[in-house]
Image (cartoon, helix red, strand yellow):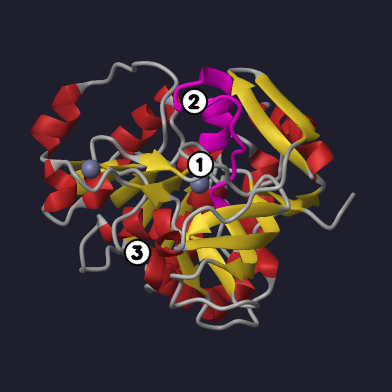
Amino acid sequence: MRAACLYAADDLRIEDVVEPVILNERDVLLRVEMAGICGSDLHNFHTGQWISRSPSVPGHEFVATVLKTGAGVSALKVGDRVVADSRMPCLTCDKCRSGHGYLCSQMGFVGEVNDGGFAPLTVQAEQQLIRLPDQSVPSHIAVLAEPLAVALHAVNRLGTAVPKDVLVMGAGTIGALTAILLQHRGVRNIALFDTNQERQEIFCKALGLGIPGAGELQDNAFDACIDTTGSAGAFETSLSSVKRGGDLVVVGLYGSNITFDMNRIVEGGLRLSGCAAFDNELEEAVLLLAELAPKLACLTCRQISLEDVPSMYGELSSGTSAVQKALIRHDVI
Ligand SMILES: [Zn+2]
Ligand SMILES: [Zn+2]
């Protein structure tokens, strides 16, 4: 079968590989319907930060159908549609043993520790898979479950009280999903900002949000900000936009160290939260898929073939693409 194989930083090849087989009794052989390209896939491609095996087949965001189960699999059967829990914690460190596996110091991910969904077939352990509660959710919606869990985790950092005014920095996948969840929670004023105006405008119009310009992001205008960008310049704006005593949640990955005025946090009494991946939000995200489907359909997605992945990496990395999520379809040659 054909697969995308990451050998090293800046070295991704589409090539023939041996089809995976069930090796353990808890393994499940899956036909991948659709797989999403994540910002972390691009980060790993550019930096090689998480290459623990070479080559490896990336792809931790996917929806798939069960083709075959190992003898010890009990909760899944042939034909079930599933999504993957991308996280592979070590299960032995202090955080894992105390029930906080999402903070595992040795956290690995599907598509890094093992081969993922950038191939038409993949084998995953049963505990890595969640059966879709609504089996009829279309692939292009179900494939968003994992990034939706990431956005849900970021939104949950704001606590249970719904803030009135929230700034979301970055209209990529996580920013867009964050805006959808805030709207779902009844936040009155959501400002979704991106320096990529085309991407921002298309999505804001589709979701029925106003389109804030840079000039409207005044100092101290928002109860909270969720910054999904990983950009030093954006963080500066995020920092100055939050009211005293407000929340600043950071969910982007940064390519290098950044500097900022720490006194904005100290004197402003801000709560600064970092978050990566998610805790127990994937189950909730999966349950929300059907209800949120009309809003999730507002994302600017592009369905591509496996052979298109290298050029799509280039387009997404340019920062100028209006595409929020590229989805690999394995039935498209
Ligand atoms: Zn992801
Ligand atoms: Zn651990």
**Which residue is at a point 52% across and 27% down the rendered structure image?**
44
Residue sticking out furthest to the right: 333
In the picture of the structure, the residue carrying the numbered disc 2 is 51
In the picture of the structure, the residue carrying the numbered disc 1 is 114
- SS assignment at label 3: helix
Q: Which three-letter amino acid code belongs to the residue tagged 1?
A: Asn
Mark positioned earlier in the residue sequence (1 or 2):
2
Mark positioned earlier in the residue sequence (3 or 2):
2
Query: On screen, 194 above or below 135?
Result: above
Question: Which quadrant of the figure shows ligand 2?
Answer: top left
Query: On screen, 72 above or below 214?
Result: below
Pick the quarter of the image with the N terminus: top right
**Which residue is at a point 44% across and 73% down the rendered structure image?**
184
- Please state which of residues 122 and 11 is positioned toward the viewer in this rendering: 122
Q: Point out residue 80 in the picture as x, y percentages from the top left corner.
A: 60, 77
Callout 1–callout 2 Cβ contact below 8 Å:
no
**Which residue is at a point 51% across and 76% down the rendered structure image?**
76
Q: Point out residue 103 in the picture as x, y percentages from the top left corner.
A: 23, 44
- SS assignment at label 1: loop
Work out how far the residue at label 1 is from the one at label 2, CA to CA, in angstroms: 11 Å
In the picture of the structure, the residue carrying the numbered disc 3 is 281
Tag in front: 1 or 2: 1
